[in-house]
Amino acid sequence: MTLTKSKFAIILAVVIIGFGVGIYLQDLKHQESTEAAWKANRYNLERFNQIRSYTGKMNSANWRWMRDSIAQELDSFMILRYRREVDSLKGVRNTGD
């Protein structure tokens, strides 16, 4: 089979269209994940600001209670983040089957 100009042009067009479609679909997924990250970050930023205000209120009389409260907040934050990651991985596995 010889490769003529018209066959080469068709193959090149298919490859370029394939890349274009792939980039478009990747951009759609990126927008979706960015939107979800912004929603999660707004909540996380609010909690982080609360933790910062706790540290600002800390003094020698209440530092132990405040330290424990901050540690609990950070622990729960990490647990929630881990759960979200696990849920998203389960979602990827379920859609891949």
Image: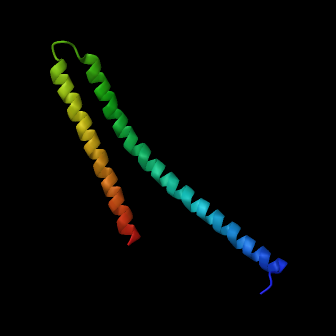
Residue furthest toward the top? 60
Q: How is the image coloured?
A: rainbow
Q: Is residue 37 left or right of residue 20?
A: left
Q: Quadrant of residue 68?
A: top left
Q: Is residue 40 left or right of residue 21?
A: left
Task: Note whether 58 is above or below 10 in the view shown.
Answer: above
Q: Position of residue 48 (x, y in %)?
A: 33, 31
Task: Note whether 93 is above or below 52 in the view shown.
Answer: below
Q: Residue at x 15, y 13 (%)?
A: 61
Q: Residue at x 40, y 69 (%)?
A: 96
Q: Is residue 63 left or right of residue 37?
A: left
Q: Position of residue 89 (x, y in %)?
A: 35, 58
* Quadrant (top left/top right/bottom left/bottom right) for the C terminus: bottom left
Q: Residue at x 29, y 28 (%)?
A: 50
Task: Note whether 50 is above or below 58 in the view shown.
Answer: below
Say which of 59 and 45 sits in front: 59
Q: Position of residue 51 (x, y in %)?
A: 29, 28
Q: Residue at x 39, y 38 (%)?
A: 42
Say which of 43 and 18 sits in front: 18
Q: Position of residue 56 (x, y in %)?
A: 29, 18
Residue furthest toward the front? 1
* Quadrant (top left/top right/bottom left/bottom right) for the N terminus: bottom right
Say which of 43 and 97 sits in front: 97
Residue furthest toward the right? 5
